[in-house]
Image (tube, rainbow, N blue to C red):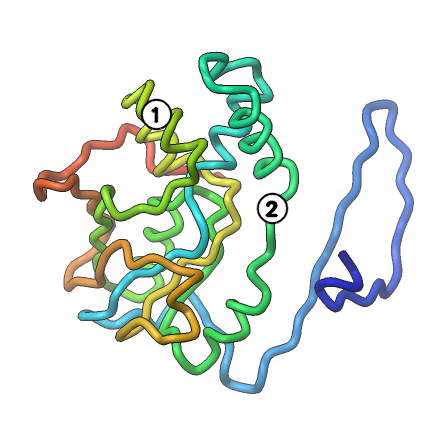
């Protein structure tokens, strides 16, 4: 990972615990001055994009807890792997500099993290649920249990990139999907394919 992602290990600390091994990591990066892609900056009329696929992390956790046993073993293993080993979108992230107006990673859940962008940017966000990209394993899981949709939309641990921009750029086209738009107002609305709002009891992980 250090070689693949250009990481330099700068130092470390060792702790003792009677429980399982615990590792804490602080990661620091560098961006050109004034070019950081922040949560603030989304503009009304922007499109909302996300990389990769959504829901694999949350479904992978269900697999590891002994759920989703109706799925093929290969599919279950794929979901568990996505939970255990997220894939950093390093090249895509660097290509967003100068193109994306606002962005962050999807760690708390797609809807919750869209909400963080909406709050910081003082705008509203509409997510089209039928456009959210799913892996084959997530599609199969959802086909058998439609009640998994809220888990997919709010579960978190995908670590994909969620960002806003005025339009799709050619260098992003094979890596991201347009899933919504930035609107006036506040908060996040999730709509189904017919334009009806989907009610979500929980919108994602809450830190406090």
Q: Are marks 2 and 1 in contact (CB under 8 Å)?
A: no
Residue 183 image-quadrant placement = bottom left
- Residue 151 horizontal/vertical position (percent): 38, 30
* Above or below, comparing residue 177 to residue 190 in the picture: below
* Above or below, comparing residue 59 to residue 114 in the picture: above
The residue sitting at 33% across, 37% down in the picture is 203
Determine crowd level at label 1: few under 14, some 14-19, many 20+ residues with C-alpha closer than 10 A: some
Query: Does residue 85 appear to the left or right of 194 in the view shown?
Result: right
- Residue 19 horizontal/vertical position (percent): 82, 23
* Above or below, comparing residue 90 to residue 195 in the picture: below
Query: Does residue 192 appear to the left or right of 141 in the view shown?
Result: left
* Above or below, comparing residue 198 to residue 76 in the picture: below
Q: Residue furthest bottom?
A: 33
Question: Which residue has dot 1 on it?
Answer: 148
Q: Earlier in the sequence, mark 2 or mark 1?
A: 2
Residue toward you, 25 or 75: 75
The residue sitting at 88% across, 61% down in the picture is 11
Determine crowd level at label 2: few under 14, some 14-19, many 20+ residues with C-alpha closer than 10 A: some
Q: Quadrant of the N terminus?
A: bottom right
Question: Which residue has dot 2 on it?
Answer: 86
Query: Does residue 54 appear to the left or right of 187 in the view shown?
Result: right
Identify the element where label 2 is drawn.
loop
- Residue 138 horizontal/vertical position (percent): 41, 32
The residue sitting at 81% across, 67% down in the picture is 8
> For residue 193, which numbered disc appears in the image?
none
Query: Does residue 179 appear to the left or right of 52 in the view shown?
Result: left
């Amino acid at each position: 990972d250090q070689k693949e992602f250009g990481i330099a290990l700068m130092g470390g600390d060792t702790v003792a615990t009677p429980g399982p091994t615990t590792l804490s990591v602080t990661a620091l990066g560098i961006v050109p001055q004034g070019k950081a892609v922040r949560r603030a900056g989304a503009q009304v009329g922007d499109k909302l994009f996300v990389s990769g696929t959504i829901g694999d992390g949350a479904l992978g956790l269900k697999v590891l807890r002994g759920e989703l046993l109706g799925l093929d073993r290969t599919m279950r293993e794929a979901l568990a792997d996505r939970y255990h080993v997220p894939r950093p979108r390093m090249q895509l992230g660097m290509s967003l500099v100068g193109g994306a107006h606002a962005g962050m990673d999807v760690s708390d859940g797609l809807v919750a993290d869209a909400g963080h962008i909406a709050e910081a940017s003082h705008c509203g966000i509409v997510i089209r649920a039928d456009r959210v990209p799913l892996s084959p394993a997530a599609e199969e899981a959802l086909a058998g249990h439609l009640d998994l949709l809220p888990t997919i939309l709010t579960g978190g641990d995908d670590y994909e990139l969620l960002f806003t921009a005025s339009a799709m750029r050619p260098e992003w086209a094979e890596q991201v999907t347009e899933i919504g738009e930035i609107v006036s107002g506040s908060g996040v609305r999730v709509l189904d394919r017919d334009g009806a709002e989907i009610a979500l009891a929980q919108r994602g992980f809450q830190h406090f």
